[in-house]
Amino acid sequence: MRKGIYPGSFDPVTFGHLDIIRRASDLVDELVIAVLRNNAKKGLFSVEERMEFLERVTEGISNVKVISFDGLLVDCAVEYGTHTIIRGLRAVTDFEYELQLAQTNKRLRPDIDTVFLTTNVQYAYLSSSVVREIAGYGGDISHFVPECIIKDVYKKVK
């Protein structure tokens, strides 16, 4: 069975994330979406809320499993039996950082590869922080996040 892991903070999940999830789920038999627990960084949403959002927006994708993790991603990948890390690239500016992470992960675990998926051009500018900022000012976020979480985002930023 081919398993992949797609890590991130997903604070909140956006259409850009969902684009990568859908495409990655076509490449593997099982896709583990791994929500990072980062105690040093205070997110808008709790890890549990982010996991719930991901479960909602991936409801129709049968080969997706949502988990949370802390520590090293490669350790999480081993724990879940994945040998492929999926990372999304929005712009060339993402590449240098992502390449450094991929090379470090490869050094730590030579049996784990990283696959980069370029995001759909219509989401190249999109990030969770942009969504949080627009929502904080009461702007329309319907073009950026799935409808099933819009009310939750507005409720949280108020």
Image: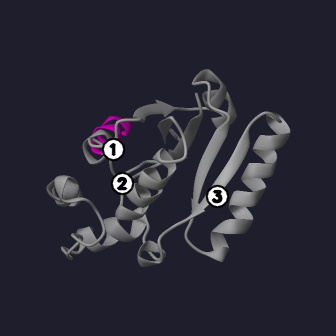
For the residues labelled 1 and 3, say whether their Cβ atoms are less than 8 Å apart.
Answer: no
Q: Earlier in the sequence, mark 2 or mark 3?
A: 2
Indicate whether 140 appears above or below 116: below
> From mark 1 to mark 3, how far is it between C-alphas?
20 Å
Is residue 156 positioned above or below 56 on the image?
below
The prevailing secondary structure element of the residues shown in magenta is: helix
Taking the image as shown, residue 14 lies to the left or right of residue 41, namely left
**Kind of element beneath mark 2:** loop
Q: Quadrant of residue 70?
A: top right
State the residue lying farthest toward the top: 79
Q: Residues within 10 Å of mark 2 (few under 14, many from 20)?
A: many
78 over 28 or under it: above or below: above
Q: Position of residue 15 (x, y in %)?
A: 35, 63
Residue 13 is labelled as 2
Distance, label 2 to label 3, CA atoms, is 18 Å
Image location of residue 29, percent across then percent down: 51, 35
Residue 156 counted in the magenta span:
no
Horizontal relation, residue 81 to residue 140: left or right: right
Residue 140 relative to residue 9: left or right: left
Residue in the image at 47% along x and 45% along y: 25
Residue 54 image label: 1
Quadrant of the snapshot with the C terminus = bottom left
Q: Quadrant of the N terminus?
A: top right
Q: What residue would you read off at disc 3?
A: 116
Mark 3: few/some/many CA within 10 Å (<14, 14-19, 20+): some
Q: Amino acid at mark 3?
A: Phe
- Tally of numbered discs: 3
**Span colored in magenta:** 47-53
